[in-house]
Image (cartoon, grey):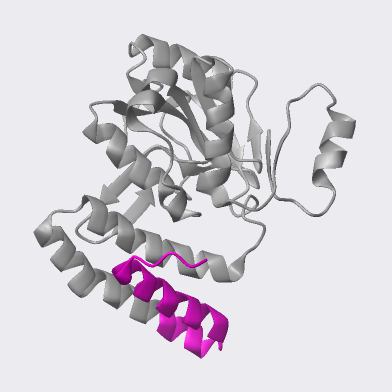
């Protein structure tokens, strides 16, 4: 387990309750990307054949890990595999049943989000991106593709990594037989400003990094500005001034590729 710079006594409480676990304590908050990279390094150094990325705000089905390992093995360990994920507060309503990436609009969406799960199909299905909420990654995929881009800090790092993974020739699969329940936002600790800043900045980064010329022009010349302006208009009505500033800063830092220190 990686503790990402907690200052509330969490590491001590975890060790008191689970004395046999390995707890890595980061001196500072490295974000979702950087914190997971520390855990990935530790897993690879220990000789792990697979690395499971798992958010702390989740409830795992007892058979989930086994189902993911079986699916990865059946792919010849050439696939990154994710479970089907549900909302913890509504266990039959979907949060993730695969993901779609649209570099024309800059939208990265969870398939089936907020829908009731009426699909009985249990075969693994191809997906555009593996969610950072939970993914099982074969060792040699990480050795070939590398880790998350730590500059992303929070949000869209899984989309960026997935696109790099696909480009390297690996598959991305959602495995319906593997199940997980998720409390969205629990891992980010309610960081309101961050939730407005990083999705905008990192979405722009991802389009600039992976899109071709016409996708960049279409997305950044029309779709992204319209989405940001509409979002800001709603925030102004609600007088959410800090959120407005965060979105404007995110737009600026995305286009200029600024990394705040």
- Location of residue 244 with respect to 84 vertically, above or below: below
Q: Is residue 92 visible?
A: no
Q: Is residue 40 left or right of residue 57?
A: left
Nearest the viewer among 180 and 3 is 3
**Residue drawn at 81 percent across, 45 percent down:** 10
From what the image shows, is residue 141 above or below residue 113?
Answer: above
Going 34% across and 46% down the picture, which residue do you hit?
A: 160
Q: Which residues are magenta?
A: 232-261
Res. 80 image quadrant = top left
Q: Quadrant of residue 174?
A: top left
Of 45 and 62, the residue lying toward us = 45
Q: Is residue 252 magenta?
A: yes
**Residue 82, percent across and down?**
45, 30
Residue located 50% across and 54% down the image: 153
Question: Residue 3 at what x, y percent from top left?
Answer: 70, 42
Residue at image x 43%, y 36%? Answer: 147
Q: Is residue 135 left or right of residue 108?
A: right
Tell me: 92 left or right of 150. right
Residue 95 placement (x, y as % from top left): 50, 45
Q: Compared to 30, does 192 lie above or below?
A: below
């Amino acid at each position: 387990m990686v503790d990402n710079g907690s200052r509330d006594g969490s590491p001590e409480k975890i060790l008191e309750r689970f004395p046999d676990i390995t707890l890595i304590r980061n001196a500072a908050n490295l974000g979702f990307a950087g914190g997971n990279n520390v855990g990935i390094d530790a897993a690879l150094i220990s000789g792990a054949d697979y690395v499971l990325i798992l958010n702390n705000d989740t409830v795992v089905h007892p058979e989930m890990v086994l189902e993911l390992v079986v699916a990865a093995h059946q792919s010849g360990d050439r696939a990154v595999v994710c479970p089907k994920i549900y909302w913890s507060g509504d266990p039959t309503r979907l949060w993730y049943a695969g993901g779609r990436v649209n570099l024309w609009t800059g939208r990265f969406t969870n398939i089936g989000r907020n829908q009731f799960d009426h699909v009985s199909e249990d075969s693994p299905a191809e997906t555009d991106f593996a969610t950072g909420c939970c993914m099982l990654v074969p060792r040699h995929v990480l050795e070939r593709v590398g880790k998350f881009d730590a500059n992303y800090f929070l949000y869209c790092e899984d989309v960026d990594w997935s696109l790099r993974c696909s480009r390297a020739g690996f598959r991305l699969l959602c495995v319906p037989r593997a199940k997980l329940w998720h409390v969205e936002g629990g891992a980010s600790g309610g960081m309101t400003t961050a939730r407005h800043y990083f999705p905008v900045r990192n979405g722009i980064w991802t389009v600039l990094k992976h899109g071709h010329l016409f996708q960049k022009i279409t997305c950044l010349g029309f779709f992204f500005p319209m989405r940001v302006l509409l979002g800001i208009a709603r925030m102004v009505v609600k007088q959410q001034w800090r959120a407005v500033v965060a979105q404007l800063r995110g737009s600026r830092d995305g286009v200029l590729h600024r990394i705040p220190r």
